[in-house]
Structure formats: structure tokens, C-alpha cells
Image: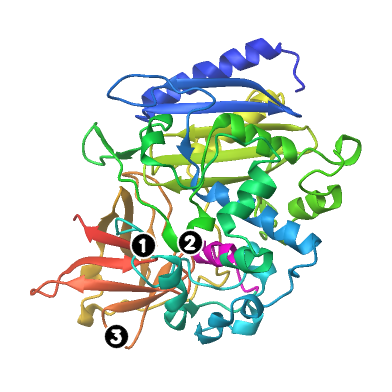
Amino acid sequence: MTSCRSRNDILADIENELEQVLQDERLPGLSVGIVVDQELSWSRGLGTRDLATGEPADEHTLHRVASITKTLTTAAVLQLRDRGKLSLEDPLERHLPEFAEAKEVAGQRDQVTLLRLLTHRAGLVTETPLPTWSTEEFPTRDEVLAALPQTEIVLPADHAFKYSNLAFGLLGEVITRASGQDYFDYVAEHLLGPLGMTDSVYWLPEDQRHRMAVGYSPDLYRDGLKPAPYVGLGGVAACGQLHSSVADLARWISLQFRVGEHAIPNDVLAPNTLDNFHQPRYSEPDWSAAQCLGWRSLRVGENVYHGHGGGIFGFASQILFSRPHRIGAIVLANLWPYPMIQSLTVRILERLLGNPDPPPLTPPALNPTDHDSSRPVAADAENGTDDRAGLYVAEPGVPVHVAVRAGQLRLEISPLWPYPLHTGGVLEPTDNPLAFRIRGGRGAGEVAVFEIDDRDVATGFTLGGFVYRRMM
């Protein structure tokens, strides 16, 4: 950490800012940690892990860390690559023959490789076509595999960044088959155990729920928060099922610094594999961000951070680290959706690295998935397309505006709660007047299907596993 101010002064500023964020953002609690090289050097539990008791969190309090799970899944794939069990260039079909039945809408099955799945460049849909985010439990492994004939490849390979939870769920199955071990057992034996991540589990027994923070969902129209449902990820658990703590995620970040003179013999990942893990594979056109294997890298001024965030019912999470400075930060909130968690984590690291004026708290930038988004798409007023404009909200509090702009029906971010899950896309008409193919944004290539009432007025739509209900 380089600054003319003392480390204690900087940490005091960080803690004061976090306390203010709790008040301003209506957060029940935050668990925060700072990693310097191989140590968790500072941690705090702010607010409460449980609004009913007021009990604070500590570094061992469990949170669901959602898509941070993807980085462990990636590490497991790299281990198996190093053991000669697979190649990153392998088509998915080589390890999952069932994938031969997947639908080639705009991409080819043989181009869906493990490498492209790891970097979200395979063009695979975001979720299995089965009900997911609107259910009490995601479909099982067998159900996900049985649904592959209805699963679509919606963008050509390498066309654009296309985030896919399903991709990492299927990579979990690849790990099972290539290793001869159940995915969860493999990760526990080859990653969690060797790293001393003793808090972390995928499936939490009921009698261990007391170790967890209580997760909450926002009420977009009132001040109160409501306890979030607990929804297991079933057959796609390798994309986001992990429960972990600040203490354990500090060990995960510390591993990322074990290169060169700091390498540990016989560690879980060889130094050259760690370099491979962090190497940018695809950069955004403005060089502001890049996709690595599992990790996303982010440029802030002269600093480049690697990291991953996560969001799941009741919990938002973010880890970021700077390899050159050997410093990282962990921020876990027991509220989801919470759109500011990445920028909050950036502010912590920027302060630690001596930036007196770090970037303000803002929602994450949209990841472009179609660089030709200027084509006009005429809104078909005769078929009622204009009548679909309005505010829609999906549980547990994800809003989106459907708006008509310059002849295009678009998905726009809502000032009500700026969580950009399905924003940034254009809805292009299909032969079905209720179905629209999305161009751009997270939903690129997928189909939004509207519901209408007996007055021919849209009441909601489904997209990417979410059910959006019209509010106005």
C-alpha cells in the first residue's frame, strides 16, 4: 500500500465510508476483508447478519457467494488439464455426448469448447430452458441434461461476451466425468481442503444454518427488507452454489499471489497455471475490462484488478485483487440485488493504493454483446408493441423498463433500483407476436416471451429464467 497517509488512517476512512454506505443503501449488513499477500490483514462485520437479533457478522460468518463459485470451477478444470484429463480446446460434446442434441440457432455445437465456456464466448444461453430463478429449486442434474435438446446456442462462437450460468453448470459435469469424482467431492479434496477453506461448503445441512447470515430481498416500494427464499441451484450448482466466508475467500485470493519467488511447491495450481488463470483472453474495445479464464479483469486508472462478483437470493458478493500489488478485498452483503457492490470494492482497493479520490459508487457497466446496436427496429404499434412499454419487476426485486426509443423496443435500466441484469438489449420481433429475440445485453440471442391479458395488454414477460411482472 502506497500513500503518505498512515495505514490506520486509510482503514479508518474505509470503515467510516462503509458505515455510511450501510445507511445510504439500506443494507442490513456487510462483511469485509482486506488481504495483503498471504494474510487476511483486516476484517470487519458492519451492520448485522440478522435483523431479528442484531448480531454482527465476523470473518467466519457464511454467505452464499454465488458466481464466485465459477472461479473454483475454473481452477478444477485447469487442474484436470494439467493432469492430462482434458484440453481446453476440447469441444464440450467430447465430454458430454448429450450435448450433440443442442439446438444450433446461431452457433455450432462443435465450436462450443471448454475454453469458450470458461470465457463466456461459446454463445450458449444464460440458463437451462427449464424453470430456474422463478422456482423454489433449480432443476436436477438429470433434468438439465435431459433438456439439452431444447437448449440453444444463440450466438456464434467468439462473437461476443455472453454470460452463461448453464456453461459452468455443464463444466461441473465435465469435471465429474473427467476426474471420476463427484464435482463437489473433487473441489473439496483438491481445492478447499488443501487451501484450508474449512468454512466453505456447497450444501449446508439444516442444523448448520445458524452459521449463515440471513439473506434479504429489497422492497422496491417500502423501506423494509424481507427474508429471501433459500433456492438451491440443483444441476447447475457448479456455477454458483458455494457458501463461504471472508476468512476462506482471503485464502482463495492469497493463492492468486503464489507465483514467482512466492510460489509454494506442490501447491494446488502450478505457477505457470496461475499465470494462465489470470491471462486476459478477450478485451473490451475500450480496454476497460477483459475476460480471463473464470476471472474478469477491470482497469481503474493505472490499476488492473482481477475478480468476480455474485448475486443470489439474499446475498451479493465481490472479490477483487491486484496481482502486482499483492492486495485484495472481499465484500459480502446480505442483500440481493445490490448493484453497487463492485464499485464499493473498487473504492476500498483504490484507497489502499493511495488514490484520494476513488471512483464514485455506480452500478456495473453493461457488458457489450453486440457492437452493431445502432440498426433501427421499427416498433409495430399495430400489433401492440408500443403497449408493452412500462416498468417490469422480477423477484426478488430486479426492475427493468421496456421503452420505445427511436423506433426500437429496448430494455433499459431502472432508476428505481439500478441493477442492470437484463438491460441494454433491443427486442426484435419474430413470427410470434408475443416473442422477441434480444439483440445486445445479457439476454443477447435469447427470446423474451410476453404474456397478455384479455384486453391484449402485456402483463409480464419471461427472459433468461426470470419472470418479469408489469408494475406500470
Q: Is residue 139 left or right of residue 444?
A: left
x and y percentages locating residue 37 in the rendered image: 76, 29
Q: Within 10 Å of the Cα at label 2, are there few (<14), some (14-19), or many (20+) other Cα atoms? A: many
Residue 109 in view, yes or no: yes
Identify the residue position indicated by label 1 in the image: 132
Which of the labelled discs sits on residue 438, or is there none? none
**Distance of mark 3 from mark 2, alpha carbons?**
30 Å
In the image, which residues are magenta?
158-172
Q: What residue type is disc 1 on?
A: Thr
Q: Residue at x 32, y 52 (%)?
A: 399
Q: To which quarter of the image does residue 456 belong?
A: bottom left
Q: Would residue 144 appear left or right of 387 to someone viewing this image?
A: right
Does dot 3 land on a helix, a strand or a loop?
Answer: loop
The answer to which quarter of the image holds residue 392 is: bottom left
Question: Between marks 3 and 1, how big is the CA–CA gap?
Answer: 23 Å
Q: Nearer the viewer, mark 3 or mark 1?
A: 1
Q: Which residue is under mark 3?
A: 432
- On the image, numbered disc 2 is attached to which residue? 236
Q: Residue at x 43, y 73 (%)?
A: 446
> Separation of disc 2 and disc 1 at Cα?
10 Å
